[in-house]
Amino acid sequence: MKEIVEVAVGLPVSKTFHYRIPEKMKSFLQVGMRVLVPFKGRKVTGFAIDLLDQAPEGIEERLREVEDLLDEFPLIDPSMLRFCRWISNYYLYPLGEVIKTGLPPGLQLKSELVLSLTQEGMEGLNKGGLEPIQKKIFSEIGRFGKVNLQKIIKMFPEEVSRSQLFFWKRKGFLNIDAEVKDRQVKPKFERVVQYRGGELLKPLSKKQTDLLRWVGERGEVPYSELNKKFKSPSKAIQSLQASGLLAISYKEVLRDLSARSELKAYPKPELSSHQEALLTEIFKGIYSKRFSPFLIHGVTGSGKTEVYLRAIEEVLNQGREAIVLVPEISLTPQLLSRFKARFGENLSLLHSGLGRGERYDQWRRIWRGEVKIALGARSAIFAPFKKIGIIIVDEEHEPSYKQEEKLKYHARDLAVVRAKQEEATLLLGTATPSLESFYNAQKGKFHLLSLPERIEGKPLPRVEVVDMKGEGNLLSEKVNAALRKNIEDKKQSLLFLNRRGFAHFILCPDCGFTFKCPNCSVTLTYHLKDHSLQCHYCDYGIPAPGSCPQCQGQRLKGVGIGTERLEQEIRDLFPQAQVGRMDRDTTSRRRSHQQILKGLESGTIDILVGTQMIVKGHDFPNVTFVGVVSADTSLHFPDFRSSERTFQLLTQVAGRAGRGDVFGEVIIQTFNPDHYSVLKAKDHDFIGFFQEECQFRKALDYPPFSRLINFRLTGNSEKGTKAMAEALGKVGRLLLEKKYPKGIEILGPSAAPFTKMKGKFRWQMLVKGKSSQQLHQFAQELASQMEVQTKGRGVHLDIDVDPVFIL
Ligand code: ADP
Ligand code: ZN
């Protein structure tokens, strides 16, 4: 039996730690279980990642014991642990935090610091002689008996600090103890009444007879249901239980209501010859039981979803399991209902609307093998299956696969890694492949499959570009005419504008004043509905003032339009039309998004105005016209992927048109009619776009021709953050000179494009390299040197590894 356990704690510390295993745990503790361990005066949850016969040299005497064992079974199996180790290495992120990211929330037991008065403290309070503040706080603690340290600090933020409390502890007035409060997420049990039957030993009352029949007909009924159905049934149930006719037990119930929503049939169609050909290749991959990565480049409406469904069916036949990633699950109700109709209960949906308990239940259904398919947004890549046969990433180009906080992983890249580790088939599907993926396909790392045509030979829409230079109005005459015609023909139209709100910002023409967010380096957006100015990056918002706060001028005016204003203009222009709007403001309520799409489906909406939410893979046959109000917003974004993003958005939004029997039409309005993103989208020419964009990337040595790691510094102080950034630059360049004379380039440090965000100042330094391995080694060394420098300086270093492949 092993003596020592290596533990990765769920905290931002890069090391792992060793603990002694108490005698009583030795025969139970396994790798992958959670343990509660003492850590810096606290108790925290960690994961057992290795068991050893003896401690690594030199630390034996400092070893402490594991405090508690939190699981009966390992939560992570060896292959999941291997996956997490890979992630931890690649993204330079603590292993314990990676494991935590992969588990449902609510499994982190930890201690809290709890205050109580010592004898001396109590006497001080009774006898007097304390300072007024001390008295106030001690009597508060005395009133509770025991109270959370954080709570006291929150109650008296001005009067008391953490160090003050610890000072009183040292003086002998206070006890400060680490106590563990169990706030873990738990399975939910429900009391059920079961029918047992048998001989009647004594006559039953009417109520008992009714009750018995009710349960008898159903076999098993939740107690709560009987409570509703029969008036105070507990006595009757008790006596029926006593005579053995009924039994009461507890059953685990699933806390997920969304899984049981309405089912619409999605009959299996006859496959098209293109689909057939693709599946032949994919099946070969599935049967090989080896890592088989495919990039499916299928134009919009080419029937990719059906390919996914058939591939999954085959994987299930082989007794293996499937993970399906979609960009944002709430935005893809159509895809979802197709999956539900085909696979029913065999599907676990992991979406952001799930509560803690629901998420935990879904996780356990997967973990126990009760479902074979997990469908969800990026975190579904951690679904705890044990026999993965296929991983599918729909719309693989979508930026939302990248998590921008904490562990900055890219779910598509993790899909590649996990599929590789599990010897599974990988399908990356899209009409607009990311440059990285297509490049990988060209290099032969992915097997490229194409669906070059829409289903049933439907043509792709005709796209026209309108130059807005010299146009005075928001909508060109051409767009107006197309909308008017569609209303007359009882067809539907989409209008795409990638900015919500009424006016982009408010300007005083007299003095040039604009309203800026105090927390972020952006202007505030005007919203008409509640007459407010809002920041789209943080929660900041104020009522819109009537006059300029700087010069008291009365002529404040809105500049740049958003979807709210567009909607109003359309209503004014076409009073006879039903106009809808879909953006973050109109979809904040649960199901509101689905309702808008229903309006489109049932034909109660003639024109739908929206942000990129309307771009997502919807399939509405009566939509025949799509207008892009401005292609320029995304084009000017300060990011080297802005052209790629623009091409993707334009192609995807255009792809919503003409999916039915009527030819589709698209008009793109832009001030940059000659930009290749616009021109290639107009011609549905992905390959042409790819080639042109590659020239630009190659010239500047950007991905996919190099790899990038961004070192980001954030801090509350502008000066402090800048100084730390300069230090980072110095340390980085020194390291470069000394150990990496070739192959790595440092850009910056410089202020980030939006220097201030959510009240924090942001600086960054880009590191570029040809070899991923070398770049990572460099980054690791730099990070560990900086760990010392940033300690206690109020500046946080974040490492962001650009999505690049790993194969
Ligand atoms: P994509 O995801 O490639 O844009 P979809 O999967 O949404 O395309 O398919 C487009 C439309 O074609 C959908 O309405 C779908 O039901 C239909 N479809 C897919 N495959 C077939 C098929 N083999 N026969 C007939 N209709 C099909
Ligand atoms: Zn803000």
Image: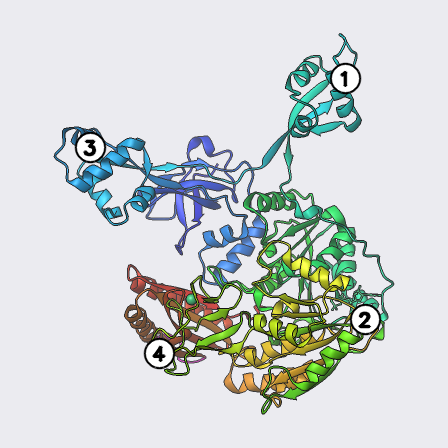
Discs 3, 2 touching: Cβ within 8 Å: no
Residue occupied by mark 1: 209
Q: Amino acid at mark 3?
A: Gly
- Give the residue at x 71% y 12%: 243
**Nearer to the camera, 43 or 783:** 43
Q: Check contact, mark 4 vs mark 2: CB within 8 A.
A: no
Neighbour tally class for label 3: few under 14, some 14-19, many 20 plus, Cα within 10 Å? many
Q: Please, what secondary structure does the residue beneath circle 4 have?
A: helix
Front residue of this view, candidates 181 and 238 = 238
Image colouring: rainbow
- Magenta residues? 738-743
The answer to whether residue 442 shows anywhere in this view is no
Query: In this figure, which residue is indicated by the disc labeled 4?
Result: 737
Q: Residue furthest bottom?
A: 470
Residue type at the position of mark 1: Thr
Query: Which numbered disc, 3 or 2, marks the residue closer to the eye?
Result: 2
Q: Position of residue 191 (x, y in %)?
A: 63, 28
Please name the amino acid that badge 4 sits on.
Glu
Q: Nearer the viewer, mark 3 or mark 1?
A: 1
Name the mark on residue 660.
2
Q: Residues within 10 Å of mark 2 (few under 14, many from 20)?
A: some
Distance of label 4 from label 1 (alpha carbons)? 89 Å
